[in-house]
Image (cartoon, helix red, strand yellow):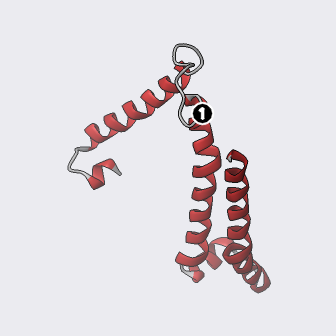
Amino acid sequence: MLEERTSLPRVTATLIGGVAVWLLGVAALLSFNVWSDVSLLGLNIFDFLDTLTAKFLLPLTGLGAIIFAAWCLERKSVEKELELSAFGVRAWNVIARVIAPIGVIVVFITGVAGLL
């Protein structure tokens, strides 16, 4: 993404991304000792990154994936990939378009409400 959205060459973009992830890892590691007093929103760095990932990014990524699969992909390609019967395709459409997004939203809201 860095390479596509900027004029950076691939090697430079990869190095920048790798160093950024490495620094986040080191910051999380140091939050158990040297930086134990540092806090973001009342959480140490490790707990903040864990909460950000588990409570926000995972549910929102899941919601995006199911919305993309259910609403953006061609129905014929989905039917071909899943190899379901006619009933299975109808059931998948209902589950993927209605039930799964509602379930993910409930999980997201529950997780966020637990933080408040």
Image location (x, y in percent) of residue 83: 70, 75
Image location (x, y in percent) of residue 85: 76, 82
Question: Residue visible at 68% across and 47% down?
Answer: 116
Q: Amino acid at mark 1?
A: Gly
* Left or right of residue 104, residue 26 in this image: left
Image location (x, y in percent) of residue 89: 72, 81
Question: Residue visible at 74% across and 84% down?
Answer: 90
Q: Place residue 84 in its image quadrant.
A: bottom right
Q: Place residue 31 in its image quadrant.
A: top right
Vertical placement of residue 99 versus 111, above or below: below
* Left or right of residue 11, residue 77 in this image: right
* Residue found at the far top of this picture: 34
* Residue found at the far left of this picture: 7
Of residue 109 and residue 89, the one placed in the foreground of this image is 109
* Left or right of residue 13, residue 70 in this image: right
Helix or strand or loop: what does disc 1 sit on?
loop
Across the whole image, how many numbered discs are drawn on residues? Answer: 1
Vertical placement of residue 64 versus 71, above or below: above
Image location (x, y in percent) of residue 42: 60, 33
Q: Place residue 50 in its image quadrant.
A: top right
Name the residue that disc number 1 marks. 42
Vertical placement of residue 106 versus 46, above or below: below
Question: Residue visible at 50% across and 28% down?
Answer: 25
Q: Residues within 10 Å of mark 1 (few under 14, many from 20)?
A: few
